[in-house]
Amino acid sequence: MATLYARMSDRALRPMFPKGMINSIVISVTPLALDHTMDMDVPNII
């Protein structure tokens, strides 16, 4: 599941960066609270 969430984040954020950008970028998604009734994919793409 972690790979799926990472791909969802990547696909949502990638268009925001310029096409010629060659620098390495690290984006870390950390939940501040967890509710077991809600999947983590929704907050991941927000």
Image: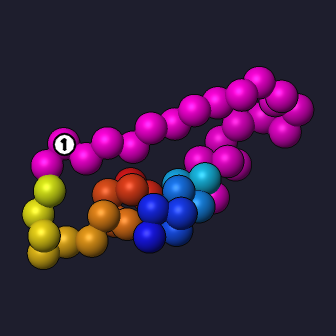
Q: Quadrant of the C terminus?
A: bottom left
Q: Which residues are magenta?
A: 11-33
For the question of whether residue 46 can be seen, the reply is yes
Q: Is residue 23 magenta?
A: yes
Label 1, on which residue? Answer: 32
Instruction: Tell me the quarter of the picture where residue 25 sits.
Output: top right
Q: Is residue 27 magenta?
A: yes
Q: Residue at x 70, y 37 (%)?
A: 17
Magenta span: predominant SS is: loop
Q: Residue at x 78, y 34 (%)?
A: 18
Q: Residues within 10 Å of mark 1 (few under 14, many from 20)?
A: few
x, y (%) of residue 37? Answer: 12, 75
Say above or below: 30 vs 10: above
Q: Quadrant of the N terminus?
A: bottom left
Q: Residue at x 14, y 56 (%)?
A: 34
- Callout 1 secondary element: loop
